[in-house]
Every structure is written in C-alpha cells, then in structure tokens.
Image (cartoon, rainbow, N blue to C red):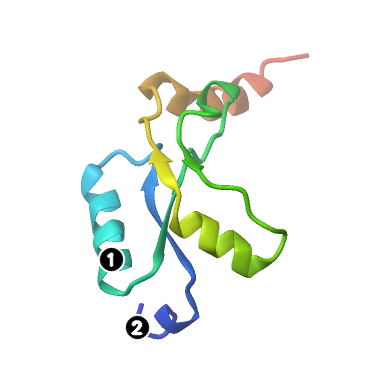
Amino acid sequence: FKEIIMHTDIVETYNSRNLFKADDQKAAKAACINKIIPGVSSDAHTAGELGKTYNLMPDFDSTPQGFLKALSQATAVTSRTNFIHRFAPSYARFTRFFRS
C-alpha cells in the first residue's frame, strides 16, 4: 500500500457489491488518512444494479484535474446490490452449457 499511495488519486470507498461494510470502512479510513479523493461504485454486473450507487458531481471540464476537483466535491449516492443480483452472472454462465 505504501508503495503505491503516492501515485493514487482516488480510492473506492464504497462498492455496492461488497458483502461486508467493514471493507468499505477500511477503504474510507485509508482515503481520509492519506487525503485521497473518495469515490463510490455500483460495480454493476447486471442491468438491475445500474444506477444504484454513483457519485453526484458538479459539472467539470474535460481535463483530469477538472474531474478530480469535481469528484472531490461529489455527493456519494449509495445502495447495496440486491443479493439475488450477485448470482446472475454465475447463473448466466451455468445455463449457457444447457442451451442448444
């Protein structure tokens, strides 16, 4: 961690697919301690997960610096993925074997 922290701009502090809140809390603490911009993600694997978790950001120019500034001012909108959605990718892979 210490080797890459100086090269880090953003830390994902909430992933809606995480099973354990403690994982998000550890990431949030690391971001805060190291003064790194927090970001959240739905990590969507299915359409039903899209839009559940996102960063509500002010408008910004198309530069990386503008993006980072806007993300640092973002409001995190978070919601855990429905447990059933976790199985959809595995179900799709499994049923592929039984299709003609």
Estimate the x, y position of residue 28 in percent, counting from the top left: 29, 57
Q: Residue at x 44, y 83 (%)?
A: 6
Q: Is residue 86 above or below residue 36?
A: above
**N-terminal of the two: label 1 or label 2?**
2
Which residue position holds label 2? 2
Q: Nearer the viewer, residue 32 or 2?
A: 32
Q: Residue at x 37, y 30 (%)?
A: 79
Q: Is residue 90 left or right of residue 11?
A: right
Q: Secondary structure at mark 1?
A: helix
Labelled disc at residue 32: 1
Instruction: Identify the residue at the far right of this view.
Output: 100
Q: Are marks 1 and 2 in contact (CB under 8 Å)?
A: no
Amino acid type, callout 2: Lys
Q: Is residue 66 left or right of residue 37?
A: right
Q: For the N terminus, which image quadrant?
A: bottom left
Labelled disc at residue 23: none
Q: Is residue 35 above or below residue 59?
A: below
Estimate the x, y position of residue 72 in percent, counting from the top left: 45, 59
Estimate the x, y position of residue 83 in percent, counting from the top left: 36, 23
Q: Nearer the viewer, residue 7 or 32?
A: 32
Q: Secondary structure at mark 2?
A: loop
Q: Nearer the viewer, residue 43 or 51?
A: 51
Estimate the x, y position of residue 86 in percent, counting from the top left: 44, 28
Crowd band around label 1 with a 10 angstrom C-alpha radius: few (<14), some (14–19), many (20+): some
Q: Is residue 75 above or below residue 45?
A: below
Crowd band around label 2 with a 10 angstrom C-alpha radius: few (<14), some (14–19), many (20+): few
| Quarter where residue 27 is shown | bottom left
> Distance from label 1 to label 2 (Cα)?
15 Å
Q: Nearer the viewer, residue 45 or 56?
A: 56
Q: Residue at x 25, y 42 (%)?
A: 20
| Quarter where residue 45 is shown | top right
